[in-house]
Image: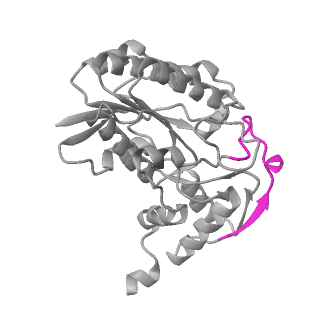
Amino acid sequence: MKQVLVTGGSGQVGTELARHRWPEGWEAVALTRADLDLGDPVAIAAKVAERPWAAIVSAGAYTAVDKAESDVVTAWAVNALAPAALAAAAHGAGIPIVHVSTDYVFPGDRDGEWEVDDAVAPLGVYGASKLGGELAVRTACPRHAIVRTAWVVSAHGNNFVKTMLRVGADRPSLRVVADQRGSPTSAADLAAALATLTVRLADDPAAASGTYHFSNAGPTDWHGFAEEIFRQSAARGGPSPTVEPITTADYPTPATRPANSLLSHRAIERDHGIQPRGWQTALGDILDELLGTPHQEKTA
């Protein structure tokens, strides 16, 4: 059995990597914070040396974007130093590493999709610390895939879909930001892409390494995302409040969000043939898990 060390096992992506149907002979070992302290480089090195892993997926991260502005040291320890330790250990063991990064490495200050080789300029501590992790992985382990993603949602943990359903169940109307654009990402779809990259890098020394983007396909904004959540929720008997658009200025936060988080998929399609499906379809699968299938499907 080829085992893959997965960090962030209790997070959305780690949970889906553990649930994912890996190829026969492969197994994801998803480690939680209790299993591995990402703030301890010695513990990381020891865990990688513990058994003959086939690869590492670095999915653990400090994702409290606003809190990171005042918790700088912890954010950098988890988002930059931990990937550095993981990548160094992977290189020493002769195995590849697949590292999850973020759209927050970009300033979000122009229209169109961000390409993998566009100039980075993070707006805050979270994005800067994640960029530090990218640089560490690139320099420490040549056999790597860095996968930037955005707006991750699932039926697990804390995310926008679950927040909308919870708040929408108690209120007849909601106010949601409409001037930040991006593409939602199903954690399950991201996990499938990460698994594909992991197996390919581990099995084929000539497989393409590099930086990639993955989100589900199609643009929207947070307001449009909320409207689609409630449209599909209503079909499943769930909450369906009205959604009022507001601006980012109407909802100030400690950390500045990119106004444009759209990510180009050209590189991952070109090098690995991974083509993301539409975000509305992926959202439907999440809502099926949370609310059940649409009523017409139940009576068909």
Query: Which residue is painted at 57% across and 62% down in the image?
Result: 165
Q: Is residue 256 magenta?
A: yes
> Residue 32 appears in which quarter of the rendering?
top left
Q: In this view of the protein, which residue sits in the foreground, 14 or 97?
A: 97
Name the quadrant of the C terminus: bottom left
Judged from this view, the residue extending furthest toward the bottom is 300
Instruction: Specify whether residue 170 is in view.
Output: no
Q: In this view of the protein, which residue sits in the foreground, 215 or 175?
A: 215
Query: Which residue is painted at 40% across and 39% down in the image?
Result: 10
Q: Is residue 206 above or below residue 176?
A: above
Query: Which residue is painted at 64% across and 58% down in the image?
Result: 219
Residue 211, percent across and down? 50, 35
Residue 259, percent across and down? 74, 46
> Residue 131 appears in which quarter of the rendering?
top right
Query: Which residue is painted at 76% across and 44% down in the image?
Result: 110
Q: In this view of the protein, which residue sits in the foreground, 109 or 161?
A: 109
The residue segment tinted magenta is: 241-260
Q: Main secondary structure of the magenta part?
A: loop
Instruction: Specify whether residue 139 is in view.
Output: yes
Name the quadrant of the N terminus: top left
Residue 273, percent across and down? 41, 51
Q: Is residue 233 above or below residue 146?
A: below
